[in-house]
Image (tube, grey):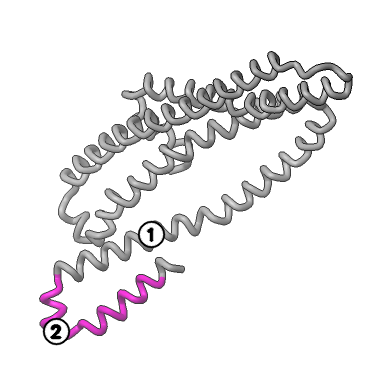
Amino acid sequence: MNTFSSLRRLGYYLKPYKFKFILVMFLVIATVGFNTALPYVTGLPTTEISRNLSNGDPINFDYIKQTVIAIIVIGVGYGGSRLAAGLLMTGVVQSAMKDLREDISHKINRLPVSYFDTRQQGNVFSRVTNDVDVVSGALQQSLVQLVNAFLSIVLSVSMMFYINVYMALAAIIMIPASYFISRFIISRSQKYFNGMQNALGEMNGFVQEHMTGFNVTKLFGQEKATAENFKEVNRSVKN
């Protein structure tokens, strides 16, 4: 299954909570807006003081007071919108993962016995626990971060062009290089991530089978061989 098919299937579980999800996206947009505006507004008092001193004028405390209030409001807005987005997204993801686990449970109950005879039980267990946790973490963290990063780039570039065109052009030159570096890292790390998940499934299967069959292992004196096999499985997870 490719990435887009997986995203479509995940979207099916997010659909019942689409209104909360849309609200999260609006809060993320607000967070990025506050975060982008904060450095610009923070520099206004310093700019005003420098301008007053260079012109020999008295310091405009009224203007500085207004900008300080604006900085506080923007800071509170940034923190509040970020916190609210995180809490709402956590609720949406956990509800969606609950539905996913229920569907997995129903699917497992419909599978024939032959399916379990040809697979390690721990590997099946790992799909219900570890794999779902990975999906949950990806939705809860990576999705919001992806939207946040995209909007941050767009708004930051706009603000940079507003402040200084030449500095903005110099910074934009680095974007293609960053993109290709990130793509290179992802293409190389994906196989290791898949290997780690497979190794975790194998280890869970090994532990589950030998813990439930401990009496048999003890009866035939296979404790040492089992320990060596576990070290090998554990080493594959580590590597």
Q: Which residue is mark 1?
A: 198
Q: Considering the whole magenta stretch, tell me its main secondary structure.
A: helix
Q: Give, as a three-letter code, the residue at label 2.
A: Phe
Q: Which residue is mark 2?
A: 220
Relative to 125, say whether 55 is above or below: above
Rendered residue at 37%/22% (across/down): 20
**Magenta region:** 213-235
Q: Give, as a three-letter code, the residue at label 1.
A: Asn
Label 2 – label 1 distance at C-alpha: 29 Å
Magenta includes 160?
A: no
User: Which mark sits nearer the N-terminus, 2 or 1?
Assistant: 1
Q: Position of residue 168 (x, y in %)?
A: 78, 31
Q: Position of residue 37 (x, y in %)?
A: 64, 24
Rendered residue at 45%/39% (across/down): 141
Towards the viewer: 11 or 31 = 31
Rendered residue at 39%/57% (across/down): 197
